[in-house]
Amino acid sequence: MFQPLYRRTLALAASPYAGWWLFAVAFAEASFFPIPVDLMLIPMVLAARQRAFLLAAICTAGSVTGALLGWVIGAVLLQHVAMPIVHFYHAEHSLTALQEKFRQYGVMIILLKGLTPIPFKIVTIAAGAAHFSILPFLAASLVTRGARFFLVATLLWFYGPPIKDFIERRLTLVMAGFLFLIIAGILAVTLL
C-alpha cells in the first residue's frame, strides 16, 4: 500500500526540483499542513545520502519560513485562518494554554515543542496569537527545527544503508509508527 508513495518520494529525490519540493512541504508543515516533513526528508536522504546535510538545511529553512507564516496567521488572522486549523486538531484549549505558556516561559516553549511530535504549526500559531516577539521566536525556531532535521540527517548519513533496508522490508510497520507519532502529537496538543 505504501510502496508506490515511497518509490515516488525516492524518485522525487533524484529530481532537479527535489529541494524545492522539500522546502515547500517543510514550509507548509510549519504553518498549516498536517503531515510531518520527515515523511519526505527521510526517503530523500536515503536516496541521496551525500546530500543529507543540504537536505536538512533546506528543510530547516522551509520550516523556519513556514513558522513565520504560522506566527502571522496567529497574530493577524486568528479568527479567520488560525481557528479552523486549530479546530482541525481539536486544540482550542491547547492554543489558549500555549499562549499563557509563551507569556511564562517564552523561548523555552519553542525549543521544547519544536523537537516533539506535537504539530509545530500549533506552536507557531500560538506564538503569533500571544504576540510573542518575532526575533526570539525565529531564532528559537531555527535552533529547534535545525536540531531536529540535522539529527535525522546525521543518523541517516551514518546508518543509512541498514535503515533503508529496514524501511524497505518493513514499510507498513514504519508508516504505522509515523501514523502513531502523528496521532500522539495531535493527542498531546489536545491534552496540553
Image: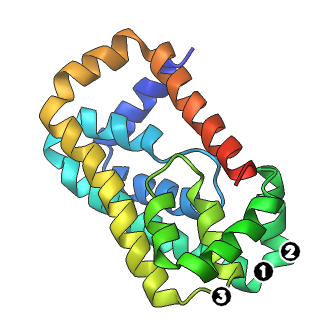
Horizontal and vertical percent for residue 88?
80, 51
Cα–Cα span, label 3 and label 1: 12 Å
User: Residue 162 sits in which quadrant?
Assistant: top left
Please tell me how crowded label 1 is: few (under 14), some (14-19), or many (20+) other residues with Cα within 10 Å: some
Task: Write down the residue under mark 2.
Answer: 80
Residue at image position (20%, 53%) is: 53
Q: Which mark is residue 131?
A: 3
Where is 58 relative to 69, above or below?
above
Relative horizontal placement of residue 110, taking residue 11 as reference (left or right): right
Q: Is residue 66 above or below residue 130?
A: above
Q: Quadrant of residue 74?
A: bottom right
Residues at discs 2 and 3 in contact (Cβ within 8 Å): no
Q: Is residue 99 above or below residue 33?
A: below
Asked if the residue at tag 2 contacts the one at tag 1, i.e. Cβ–Cβ closer than 8 Å, the answer is yes
Amino acid type, mark 2: His
Amino acid type, mark 1: Leu
**Element carrying mark 2:** helix
Which residue matches tag 1? 77
* Picture residue at 52% right of the left edge, 88% below the top: 134
Of the two numbered discs 2 and 3 on the same chain, state the one appearing first in sequence.
2
Q: Residue at x 41, y 11 (%)?
A: 170
